[in-house]
Image (cartoon, rainbow, N blue to C red):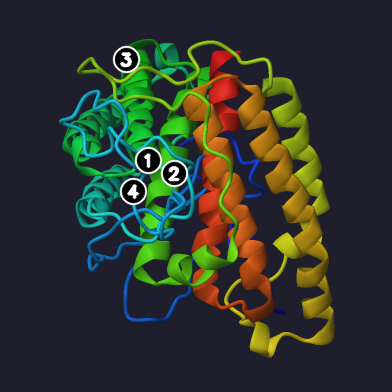
Amino acid sequence: PGGAGEGQFSGPPPWGPPPQQPQWGGPPSGPPPPNGGKGKWIIGGVIVLLVVALAVTVTILVTRDGSDGNSPTPPGDGQASEFASANDTGPVNIITEDPTCDAWLRIAREYTDVLSVLGWKNRNESIGANAWTPEQRSMYESAKTAMTRAAEQTSSLVRLTPHRAVRELYEQFMAYTARFVDLIPTYTVDDDNYLAVSDATQSSMVNICEAIQFRSAAQVAPLVSAPEPPEDPSRPATTAQSELFLAEANDICPEWDRSAVDFDRAIASWRSTDPRVPATDWTPDQRAVNEAVAPVMERNADKAEQLGRDSNNPVLEDFATLSAQYRRAFVAAIPAYSQNDNFVAEAASDLGRSITFACRAAS
């Protein structure tokens, strides 16, 4: 069977909440195409399949600022001018280039390699710190070291990216990773929600960078209309340690979670399809499944953006709007779907998951 589904190859997550927890962006991500000569990885809040690619082009965000559609937004108030993204105050949109992708993919690869060696994906996350064996305690301590190192390495990228949304993803990866690390000595299963957000933001950036490298983002970005700019865009953090974007639950969280469950159910048939099969090879039934899911995804995107704007939370709004844009871009890709378009779908899912589990961590 073929199609553009995301959940075909889901498996046990190396970390994060149990896979049965619903996600706004849909089910656990499936892997990218097995061919193409490059290793890749995808790290999700509820499933992980890591893919590495170290050749990424120098980049810039498509912000649709009203000029040529490919320039960063005009200068703002110059706050925190040491940040390349300080003047990016326009709408978030499909990212076709970013100069931090090479470094980010290297950081994520090293981090994941360490956790793989530790056997992190096989841990029983339901066992609290008070019941750890010496071996389990040692694994968590070693993971803590790897997490701390990855977050510290990411800190330099926060200043280098010219894109507000990318900066926010790096900041929240750092913030939620640090929060989970702080909780390790007294770990309980509920603390995994913080790590799920860390994983979702990490995976979002991996898929965004992979969509850049394999040009799926560039191919669909012109097909998606620009969203409205935020009323109050977030500013770079003024302290050394980034803050959680949801330190307490937001009013939109219950409706977000309900919408996530509804969306997951609505795309169940599409999820079961094989993302490796291009549209040129679809059977009539496969084409019907993919065409039927398009309006469902469009409605999901509209709902995500609406809830994000209703949140009065600048980072949540950016993540929700960016998720909606990547979802719309994937819908635009469906008629001529190729396996690299799966990176676009997965970016949408991961961005949504970051909100889902941030809501849960804060509740």
Contact? badges 4 and 1 (CB < 8 Å): no
**Amino acid on which disc 3 is placed:** Asp
* Disc number placed over residue 72 in the picture, else none: 4
* Disc number placed over residue 182 in the picture, else none: 3
Q: Quadrant of residue 70?
A: bottom left
The location of residue 123, given as percent across then percent down, is 44, 36
How much space separates mark 2 and mark 3, taking CA atoms? 19 Å
**Amino acid on which disc 4 is placed:** Pro
Mark 4 neighbour class, 10 Å CA radius: few under 14, some 14 to 19, many 20 or more: many
How much space separates mark 1 and mark 3, taking CA atoms? 18 Å
Q: Tag 2's secondary structure?
A: loop
Name the residue tied to disc 2: 14
**Amino acid on which disc 2 is placed:** Pro
First of labels 1, 2 by sequence position: 2
Name the residue tied to disc 1: 120
Of discs 1 and 3, which sits in the foreground? 3
Q: Tag 4's secondary structure?
A: loop
Q: Tag 3's secondary structure?
A: helix
Query: What residue do we see at 33% from left, 43% from top?
Result: 163
